[in-house]
Image (cartoon, grey):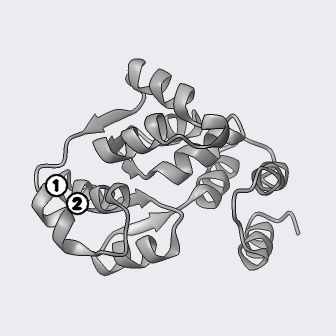
Amino acid sequence: MAKIICNSSPIIGLSIIGKLNLLWEIFDEVYIPEAVYQEVVSGNRIKNYGERELREAVKNNNIKIYKVKNKKLAKQMSPRLHSGELEVIIAAQELSITLVVIDDKLARDFADVMLLKSIGVIGILEIAKKFGKIDKIKNYLDKLMAEGYWISKKLYAEAMVRVGEE
């Protein structure tokens, strides 16, 4: 059974393109820590991307909220990561989940040090294409970038090559 635990930025990104559902269509169980839920639903961001979608996904039990047991560890781990990112990594360890969905490079590097595999929005879209859930990723990446979601030219180009859309 494939389980993942997800950070806030991928939830927001997938909500921007109307594809949050890919998480539970691809994976058997999807978790988020409480800190991530709070970031998305109470973040006071422009346009509040993800707020409605996440509330609905939790209500429908497509995404489960996890309460991290070792909050003290989260405060000690890394002062440069946000609480949501830290809770994703700790929750993954507590739940014996090896795959985390995080876009931030520093957080992904830290997850790797903690022996976790990390993917981001691009990885989710690549998997979705592989499983026939979407036809192309280019339009989705273009929409994300148009909405201000940061994707480097290098990552964009590499993703296009990996999925054969170059």
Q: Residue sitting at 37 percent across and 23 percent down?
A: 61
Q: How many marks?
A: 2
**Residue 13 vs residue 28: left or right?**
right
State whether residue 67 is above or below residue 147.
above
Dot 1: few (<14), some (14–19), or many (≥20) neighbours within 10 Å?
Answer: few
Tell me which amino acid carries mark 1: Glu
Dots 1 and 2: beta carbons under 8 Å?
yes
User: Which of label 1 and label 2 is nearer to you?
Assistant: 2
* SS for dot 2: helix
Residue 24, position as x, y percentages in the image: 48, 35
Any part of residue 71 in sight: yes
Q: Circle 1 is placed at which residue position? A: 94
Which amino acid lies under the numbered mark 2 shown in the image of this protein? Ile
What element does badge 1 sit on? Answer: helix
Q: Which residue is mark 2?
A: 90
Q: Is residue 99 above or below residue 47?
A: below
Q: Residue furthest right?
A: 166
- Position in image of residue 98 (x %, y %): 31, 61
- Work out whether 41 lies above or below 1: above
Residue drawn at 19 percent across, 65 percent down: 75
Q: Position of residue 47 (x, y in %)?
A: 67, 36
Position of the C terminus by quadrant = bottom right
